[in-house]
Amino acid sequence: MASIEHFRSQKVVHKRYIAHLLLSAKRYFENLPSLLEIPIPTMAPDLNDPSLPPRLTVCGDTHGQFYDVLHIFELNGYPSKNNPYLFNGDFVDRGSFSVEVILTLLLFKLSDPDCIHLHRGNHETKNMNKIYGFEGEVKAKYDDRIFELFLEVFSHLPLASVVGGKVFVTHGGLPTEPGVTLAEIRKIKRGCEPPNEGLMSDLLWADPQPFPGKSPSKRGVGFSFGPDITESFLKGNGLQLLVRSHEVKDEGYLVEHGGKTITVFSAPNYCDSMGNKGAFIHFAEDCEPKFTQYEAVPHPNVRPMAYAAGMGGLFM
């Protein structure tokens, strides 16, 4: 908690401590599979209020909006073994407090691995960091070597999880090739930058579309997948729901594909310009989603993309 207050005051931790944290995180993540199995807790998140049901909280993109991440914790409690979180990628870029976001999440992770789970998003990659601000931010606050260590950590982050045995969670979307199994996803080799196509690319980049089949993505990378692809993947793997992030939504979340696909986005008023709400999802034992929405909170006067090399589009 002392580190959070340090970051809240816009103070920088000495780089030798950051290097140690990042090396420890890399060692931890490289021993995980690409697909996690996350159980729903059996204890209430607040032991002083047993009326609250045991739950897991799933958050979407946070994009360097550190003060909004702190607001999530104010609303929902800090991560703990009985109040676990899954942050579904895109912790960094765009918002100019990305260093504070990812360091906070990693500190929680290494203090208690069961209190928080982290997925890789398409912005936990070298090319995106170069364009959308994280590289510039790290080099302004630290140096080139610390940025390279961040990239090594990102390359080993898991790509997906199964929550409560029923819900598939990944940053982007589903494989567009038929018949892909959870076992195949679990064995995806990491420790690299994502290829332009294939399983890893689909999980990081794909988007849902309202009509059947697959189509080239409007992003210029990967594909969009229809409700038939969602239905086939879930049925073939004994699952009931897909939760993904990757796209800003006016209400902070959107339910599609006949209730089988949920997008959750946790960066309210994205880039200080979109006016959207943020949201997170609670999953209890029945794995039925319960949504919480919230508005953006004030942050210090550092504009989004302040460290960016180029003003890329809002929707990558």
Image: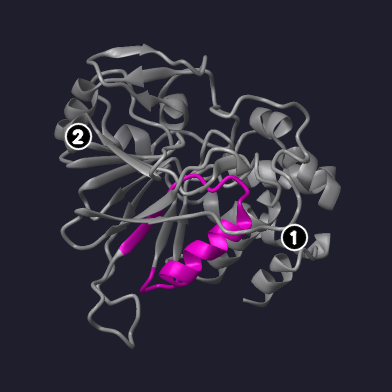
Q: Amino acid at mark 2?
A: Leu
Residue 250 colored in magenta in the image: no
Question: Relative to residue 48, is residue 18 drawn left or right?
Answer: right
Q: Give the x, y percent position of residue 104.
A: 61, 62
Q: Amino acid at mark 1?
A: Ile
* CA neighbours of label 1 inside 10 A, class few (<14), some (14 to 19), many (20+): some
Q: Which residue is mark 2?
A: 234
Question: Relative to residue 81, is residue 227 drawn left or right?
Answer: left
Q: Which residue is mark 1?
A: 18
**Residue segment shown in magenta:** 56-83
Q: Give the x, y percent position of residue 307.
A: 78, 40
Residue at image position (46%, 31%) is 204
Can residue 221 be seen at all in this image of the molecule?
yes
| Quadrant of the image containing the N terminus | bottom right
Q: Is residue 212 above or below residue 17?
A: above
Residue at image position (58%, 29%) is 314
Q: Nearer the viewer, residue 245 or 155?
A: 245
Q: Is residue 224 above or below residue 13?
A: above
Q: Please state the total of marks drawn on the protein image.
A: 2
Query: Residue 290 sits in which quadrant?
Result: bottom left
Q: Is residue 93 above or below residue 232?
A: below
Q: Earlier in the sequence, mark 2 or mark 1?
A: 1
Residue at image position (73%, 45%) is 303
